[in-house]
Amino acid sequence: MENYSDILDIIKSLKYNEQGLIPAIAQQYDSNELLMMAWMNQEAIKTTLAEGRAVYWSRSRNELWRKGETSGHIQKIVEFRWDCDNDAILLLVDQTGAACHTGERSCFFNQYRADNT
């Protein structure tokens, strides 16, 4: 980000749900692999942009969640994007280790195929 006022302008322009949250998708920047979806609030976005690493809002703990703080599986921010409706965030990240709490690289490992294979 250019400066703090740019960050504040971005945060104000985003559309949050009734709980003050916005969905954020993390994607590996160099392979386009979808890693996970989590929630962010304004504080999480400010902290993410200030620290250069993904910080989400934990709905279960009701607090900021610095991805990888205990596991070491951090997500370094490469690019911060938002969609055309301003109601979803895409974080292009450099993922260290697994993104999923199950130990899988991606949280999107469950699948159903229409051809039943």
Image (cartoon, grey):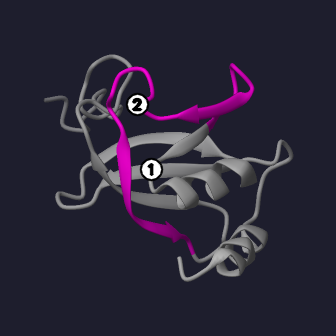
Question: In the rendered view, would you say 39 is above or below 111?
Answer: below
Residue at 73% x, 72% y is 8
**What percent of the width, then of the height, locates residue 10?**
68, 74
Q: Is residue 92 left or right of residue 60?
A: left
Which quadrant of the figure contains the C terminus?
Answer: top left
Query: Depth check: 61 or 105 in front?
Result: 61
Residue farthest toward the top in the current orientation of the protein: 102
Query: Where is residue 5, by image quadrant?
Result: bottom right
Q: Quadrant of residue 99?
A: top left
**Going 60% across and 60% down the picture, which residue do you hit?**
88
Q: Residues within 10 Å of mark 1 (few under 14, many from 20)?
A: many
> Is 70 covered by the magenta stretch?
yes
**Residue occupying the point 53% across, 76% down:** 1
Region in magenta: 57-83
Among numbered discs 2 and 1, the one appearing first in the sequence: 1
Please tell me which residue is depicted at 62% across the width and 42% down the height of the picture.
Answer: 39
Look at mark 2 in the image and give the residue it sits on: 68
Q: Residues within 10 Å of mark 2 (few under 14, many from 20)?
A: some
Give how far across and how far down residue 38 sits, in percent.
Answer: 54, 40
Q: Is residue 93 above or below residue 61?
A: below
**Whole-percent x and y of residue 21?**
73, 47
Magenta stretch containing residue 102, yes or no? Answer: no
Q: Which residue is mark 1?
A: 53
